[in-house]
Image: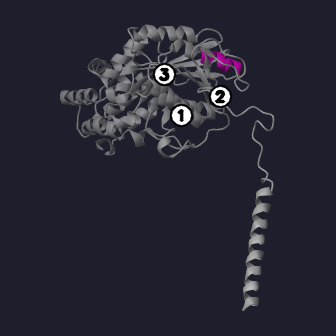
Amino acid sequence: MTLIIVLIAVAVVLVAVTGLYLVTNRRAAPPAPTSAGPEEKGGAPDRELPEGSGAGAGAAAPVSGEVAPTERDGPALVSGPAVVVEEEGPPAPVGGEEGPAVVEEAPPRLRDRLGRARSLLGGYLTSVRSRDRIDESTWEELEEGLILADVGAVVTAELLDDLRATARRDGIDSPSALVEALKAELKRRLAGDPELHMADQGTTVWLFVGVNGVGKTTTIGKLGLDQVRAGHKVVMAAGDTFRAAAADQLEMWSERVGATVVRGGEGADPGAVVFDAVQHAAARDADLVLADTAGRLHTKTNLMEELKKVRRVAERPPGVVTEVLLVIDATTGQNGLIQARQFTSAVGVTGVVLTKLDGTAKGGIVVAIRSELGIPIKRVGLGEGPDDLVAFDPDEFVEALVGDGDGDGAG
């Protein structure tokens, strides 16, 4: 019994000694190696970059009202509130909520997209064709159809006077022949220079004017895509500084098409932004500047006077303004004609871009604008996709608007 007690006591002592040894060794062991922090390596501790520093953003941030030079941006631009955001490389397709993917598609056919306009005017012309002779009611039906299509009372009267003279001169006595003569007269009136011209020297500038909501910014984006595909190096100027969303939208389009955008702070001088864009384009060998402008001002400054100033600034060397494009929403009808008169007298409009033509029955506004103001229609918008802004073709337009007499005019 005594022997058993002794053995138990020895075992307890051995366990206690072993535990003490393990605890002592663990405390004496050196700490595991860790990565040295910035101060142990001799560097300064990490600091948070100031807001707007532009690090990693690919854009120059404004410093005291100037565009700060960066290695990427090249030479410093002139004083102004502009910020340069560069997008390099080919257009990147973007989908989802951001907008439709930028993929090249076959241009839409006017005939396929002018269903509403064709159903209205074409319906009247189908009725005229069905008559067995030309009488006064024939002329009245033509007049009603043209006015309802928004050709306008004045232009309609002129058009029918010319058509009556043609019918007498050529001996036209069948309604079908009369409709064909109307189509020929419409094509003659709509004929014009559809080209968007580049400057022989200097940096080409295209100014876009029009009231808010007509689609100026989207038009710039779509034309930018078209011009990048044609091999031009494009800079977009966010000159509508009174509407922050316009600059954001233009920046989004620049990312899609592979262009550079120059923008300023909200309420900044639009002329300064456009000037900075021209200078930046010249410094980077970009040959085309697409300049957005305000459609409404939130100040006491007259809009037309502001646009005149923007044009004068855009024409300072090396800038050469070759196009002033008036963007009009086709669904506004005769209101669009009123807008065209105001902008033409102020800034010398060289061409019209008619948006949302696929969504209106008032296709005759094209005839009214061309006839009354003598301004050529350069582009028409036929949908929401990036490829739905197409060059205006008078012959194709008239054939699509009037129909061919096989019943398609009625819808």
Q: Position of residue 21 (x, y in %)?
A: 79, 66
Horizontal relation, residue 315 to residue 13: left or right: left
Q: Residues within 10 Å of mark 3 (few under 14, many from 20)?
A: some
The residue where tag 3 is placed is 192
First in sequence: mark 3 vs mark 2 = 3
First in sequence: mark 3 vs mark 1 = 3
State the residue at coordinates (62%, 38%): 91
Residue nearest the viewer, comparing 16 with 155: 16
Is residue 166 found inside the magenta-colored segment of the image? no
Is residue 279 found inside the magenta-colored segment of the image? yes
Q: Main secondary structure of the magenta part?
A: helix
Residues shaded magenta: 276-283
Q: What residue occupies the far bottom of the structure in this picture?
A: 1
Q: Position of residue 365 (x, y in %)?
A: 35, 25
Task: Identify residue type, mark 3.
Answer: Gly
* Residue 151 in view in this figure: no
- For the residues marked 3 and 2, what is the alpha-carbon distance in whole angstroms? 24 Å
Camera-side mark, 1 or 2: 1
Circles 1 and 2, Cβ within 8 Å, touching? The answer is: no
- For the residues marked 1 and 2, what is the alpha-carbon distance in whole angstroms? 19 Å
State the residue at coordinates (31%, 34%): 361
Horizontal relation, residue 334 to residue 111: left or right: left
Q: Quadrant of the C terminus?
A: top left
- For the residues marked 3 and 1, what is the alpha-carbon distance in whole angstroms? 33 Å
Per the rendering, the mark at residue 9 is: none
Task: Identify residue type, mark 2.
Answer: His
Task: Identify residue type, mark 1.
Answer: Met
The residue where tag 2 is placed is 232
The residue where tag 1 is placed is 252
Camera-side mark, 3 or 2: 2
